[in-house]
Image (spheres, coloured by chain):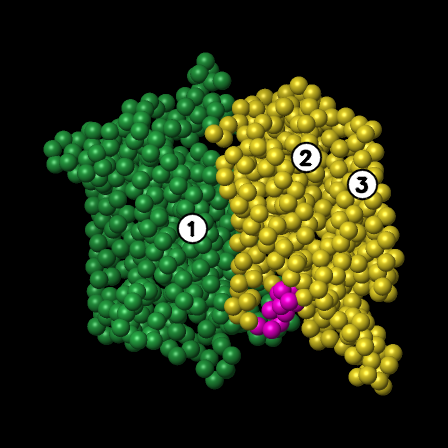
Chain colours: A green, B yellow
Amino acid sequence: MGHYVSPLRIPLIEGNKTYHDITNDICAPTERTPSALWVLGFAISVAFLALYVFIITWTIWKGIGSWNLNRTIGWGWDITNFVWWVGIGHAGTLISAILLLFRQRWRTGVNRAAEAMTIFAVICAGQFPIFHMGRVWLAFFVFPYPNTRGPLWLNFNSPLMWDVFALSTYFTVSLLFWYTGLVPDFATVRDRAKGLRWKIYNFLSFGWTGSAKHWQRWESLSLILAGLSTPLVLSVHTIVSFDFATSVIPGWHTTIFPPYFVAGAIFSGFAMVLTLMIIARKVLNLEQYITIEHIESMNKVILLTGSIVGVAYLTELFVAWYSGYIYEQFAFYNRVLGPYWWSYVGMMTCNVISPQFFWSKKIRRSIAWTFGLSIVVNIGMWFERFVIIATTLARDYLPSSWSYYTPSWVEVGMFLGSIGLFFTCFLIFTRVAPVVAIAEIKSILKVAGDQYIGPKAKKHDNH
Amino acid sequence: MNNQFVFEKKQKTTLGIFMLVGVVCMILSYLMDDGTLHMRFWSNYLTNTVYFLGIAFIITFVLHAKVLMYSGWHVAFQRVWEAFSLFLIVGIILMIPIIAGIWGHFHHLYHWADKAAVASDVVLKGKSSFLNPVWYTAGTLIIVGVWYFFFAKRFRNLSVQEDKEFDPNYTLHKKIKVNAGVFLPIAAFTSAALIWLWIMSVDAHWYSTLYAWYATASWWVGSLALTILTLIYLKSKGYLDIVTTEHLHDLGKYMFAFTIFWTYLWFSQYMLIWYANIGEETTYFHVRMRKFPVLFYGNLVLNFVLPFIILMRNDTKRKYGTLILTSIIVFVGHWFDFFQMVRPGTWLSEIEHANHAAHATHASHAAEHAAPVLSKWGYPEGFVNGVSIPGLLEIGILLGFVGLFFWFVFMQLEKASLVPKNNPYLEETEHHHVM
């Protein structure tokens, strides 16, 4: 990256910041007592987390019968929530790996929080298949290891099995990537701390001294992890899509599923990043680091991926007709006009129509609109998974087993509880770690600070 | 710095010879084919037309996308891409004989264009409101026409106009940007429809939702290879000093990344169809694997194994030798991919047509006649030139299209400076650094 910046580029760091200002601003939230707003948010989140613990206890105690799944509809809210949460995680990996490869400078403002979100989202996602197993105390059966269960061995032909590997790899690499980025930042926090706090952050930063050798190793590790994460962005949701697409169920078995699931995942992930960042930038006073420019860029990604998802929906519909295969045609007829028509309408409205508002620059740069639409997209992507799962299962090959499904209070509670789990983790994160990557923001200051580029730039500094 | 390209006589001679070879090979393929349908000729004609038209399309798409993405590094060779994108107009003209053939029934590329066949075929009848001459004609002419006149041509005009005078407000650039916003969704929807019409419908019964994206990815990787080859050639002639190893390195990375992406789509399509094992779908790959193994496996070797292994290292993306080698492999490889998409289907159409004719003329002795017809027109056994492997004629025809493409591209390059002078990202691309 040279110092030559096109006149069309807009600053990404506002307020004429020095390197010292950046350190102060970003470390501040970890150093002061939490605001009342944070405490309130945390209390609500923990309340939902408590609900989650209760629901899980109930599920284990009573069994999966406490859910409203039936013989026809064996996957309902559980797997819908699983796919929804996995999808949300994708934005973090995309930002940290793929946008790094594409050298998008705006990623530095949001990558840390998005990566954290990825980790928490994957934790939430994992809950659903684990508890869906029923006898959760035997969950370790999913790992392939020499055992005494005789011929009862893992079914390596099953995409559900691949999910176990894909998700655990994804979680591990994402965690390493996130933590690697945090190491120098933890050291920055440590250098400003005293006493026990110093000891904790020193431990967390692995005794980082900031020597050239440390930076060099840090850089090469980051590069290797970026290389590993890039295929992961594609592979994880691809394998999730295989859960459906490898079957012979019309509406599930379609070849566009892998890339379309990935696009949808990024779509929902960015929506969640926006939801979180719009609140975080305000509460933590980070508006000069997570600027309107960042929000606009993310809105563009939402518009793009939302439209890709739209192309995929219409492709599916068209090819269902084109196939001349009556079961395929019926599956899509049922999806649009069947008993769950309302969820299809919800999906189309929220995922395809609502992002089209972002064609307007004004809306892309409006915080209120962005916040509202990000929630709408989150809802829409939940609907999408519900449409794929429940609608399809409700009308299978045998009309005698056609069924309708509404969740029980336990299933609804588990979903709400998982949101509590997510926000509890996220809120703790905002208190203990720098929410914006200090070292990375500093690396773009000279090419993206508003004293160097844009209308407020001091002319003699601008090449 | 020499920024004014001159289309030299020597180049014209060489490209002229390429085209001549192409025409001779096309005539030979028309005459030498022992069938009555001249399928080898038509099949090659469709494969090449779609491949080069697609390259022009995807470059148009990427040019517009780059503007929306605030991309700066590619500006150094933007003029080359502009020249590629204008080839759309030649693509329209090249499609006309195919369209005419559908109406005039002088080729049998598309089984669905055969009214008698459709009448006795429930599946084709079901598709006939899409797979019909009117849609094919209107779709091709209107859609490609819109791509060219409203977008590729307009982009070029605005870009060239920008050269004339420096405008601190970059009004023209902003116009391009608005245009780009309009183009991307249009392009995304329409290209899929055309891919279904042009090539997926060659296997008229078969369908796959991923197909359009797969073919698009193939165009894109092929066009990256062609871009690298063009840039290295232009540099060897003393042009485009502004394009450095850094730009080529990034193009190499693109080629590497999208090679993997193409493979990802290939795998997604293949694996899901193989796994579900539904006869209507597996037939597509079954025929290719059993009867066209060179096409099936060769496709993977050329478009995945070789570029993946060669481009994995950093330095191979920065050296002319390895870049040229890989680009040739990949460019030919994706042409091979389109050959693989088209040829088995047209071969089957030929068989069906022959069987149909046999049944129609000797209805009373259908059973008797079916056997000899099948033995003559059965699946290719072993390597059959121009069917299960591309023969010399195919290579000659490809060469002819390469000649035509570059004749046109060089004509366009001559018309404007090789460097877009007042582009707002010019300074960035001049100082582009990867390492």
Residue tagged 3? B18
Query: Dot 2 surroundings within 10 Å: few (below 14), some, or many (20 or more)?
Result: some
Q: Amino acid at mark 1?
A: Leu
Magenta stretch mostly in which secondary structure? helix
Q: CA distance from mark 2 to mark 1?
A: 33 Å
Q: For the residues labelled 2 and 3, say whether their Cβ atoms are less than 8 Å apart.
A: no
Left of A27 or right of it: where is B271? Answer: right
Tell me whether marks 2 and 1 sit on the same chain: no
Query: Dot 1 surroundings within 10 Å: few (below 14), some, or many (20 or more)?
Result: many
> Residue at the bottom extreme?
B364
Query: Dot 3 surroundings within 10 Å: few (below 14), some, or many (20 or more)?
Result: many
Image: magenta residue range: B278-290
The reply to whether residue B22 is visible in this rendering is: yes
Q: Quadrant of the N terminus of chain B?
A: top right
Left of A326 or right of it: where is A462? Answer: left
* SS state under label 1: helix
